[in-house]
Amino acid sequence: MVLYQMGVRLIAFDRPGYGGSDRLEERRVADAAADVGAIADALRIDRFAVLGRSGGGPHALACAALMPDRVSRVAVLVGLCEVEETATAGWSSEMTKFNRRAYLAATRGRSAVTARVNPERFRQDPALLVRDLYAELTDSDRRVVGDAGIRRLLIRSYTEGLRQSVEGWIDDLMAFLVPWEFDLGDITAQAMIWHGADDRFSPASHARTLAGLIPNCRAVIQPGRAHFDALGVMPGVISGLAHGHSGWNSVSPSILRRAAASATSG
């Protein structure tokens, strides 16, 4: 009902290897554009906006860069920037131990991820992933994840995402660490980036990097917020996708102005 009142038709899909989607071996971030384009074709949608949260962020940007005639607006919540070649250690240096361990293992190949992280245990017990992550959460994220409804939602999401195998998740790790195969400067759509300043899963430095590379981009780096706070700002961001930059003012006008000023001066 809320989406209907906003005039939004929301379409979500599983990236290859997640949920019921077939795995695409050696996939790159850029491959998401072809998948989204095919879905839009099947639904007879010519023009649309895209939204990506966390690991979905780079894939949303791929759609905007590679389908400029079809993507009207793009938003990224707590996303990642592209890693410079051989610079994975610095790219992940501000992350939690769990994420840093996973990404550094991925630089050594799939078998290293399996040995170092043992992701299969999370497929067997998705609630274990929430418990493991909880130990490294900021106070802000603990308030969000501590909500029983949010916790159940996360466990259901992890259960569905890993129901076939953990290969899709490993493919994501590998894809983020190699060239994305598109140029952020090619994005012509209105863009918004939202990030919690205290995020330790995908640090705010990633958002600042993205904001400096994407034209026509409005950035929000919100103090006192972290990774899972993105769930709370999503309605405002979706409103912006439907109505343009003016709709994004509902996220926090004062923070938008401050972030825009910082991006201009930086």
Image: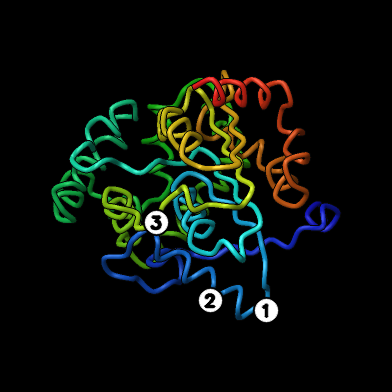
Image coordinates of residue 96 in percent, x first then y, are: 34, 29
- Looking at the picture, does residue 16 appear above or below residue 49? below
Residue 38 is marked as 2
Q: Residue at x 46, y 39 (%)?
A: 213
In this view, the residue in front, 65 or 75, is 65
Q: Residue at x 42, y 28 (%)?
A: 205
- Looking at the picture, does residue 21 appear above or below residue 257? below
Mark toward the start of the polypeptide (2 vs 3)? 2
Image coordinates of residue 258 in percent, x first then y, are: 64, 20
Amino acid on which the number 1 mark rests in the picture: Arg
Q: Residue at x 56, y 31 (%)?
A: 146
Spatial separation of the CA atoms under disc 1 and disc 3? 25 Å
- Looking at the picture, does residue 138 appear above or below residue 144? above
Mark toward the start of the polypeptide (1 vs 3)? 1
Judge left or right: residue 66 versus residue 121.
Answer: right
Q: Which residue is mark 1?
A: 44
Residue 56 is marked as none
Amino acid on which the number 3 mark rests in the picture: Phe
Secondary structure of residue under mark 1: loop
Q: Nearer the viewer, mark 1 or mark 3?
A: 3
Q: Nearer the viewer, mark 2 or mark 3?
A: 3
Tell me, yes or no, whether the two marked residues, 2 and 1, touch with CB atoms within 8 Å. Answer: no
Spatial separation of the CA atoms under disc 2 and disc 1? 10 Å
Q: Residues within 10 Å of mark 2 (few under 14, many from 20)?
A: few
What number of labels is visible? 3
In this view, the residue in front, 26 or 61, is 61
Could you tell me which quadrant the N terminus lies in?
bottom right
Image coordinates of residue 254 in percent, x first then y, are: 71, 21
Secondary structure of residue under mark 2: helix
Amino acid on which the number 2 mark rests in the picture: Ala
Q: Which residue is mark 3?
A: 182
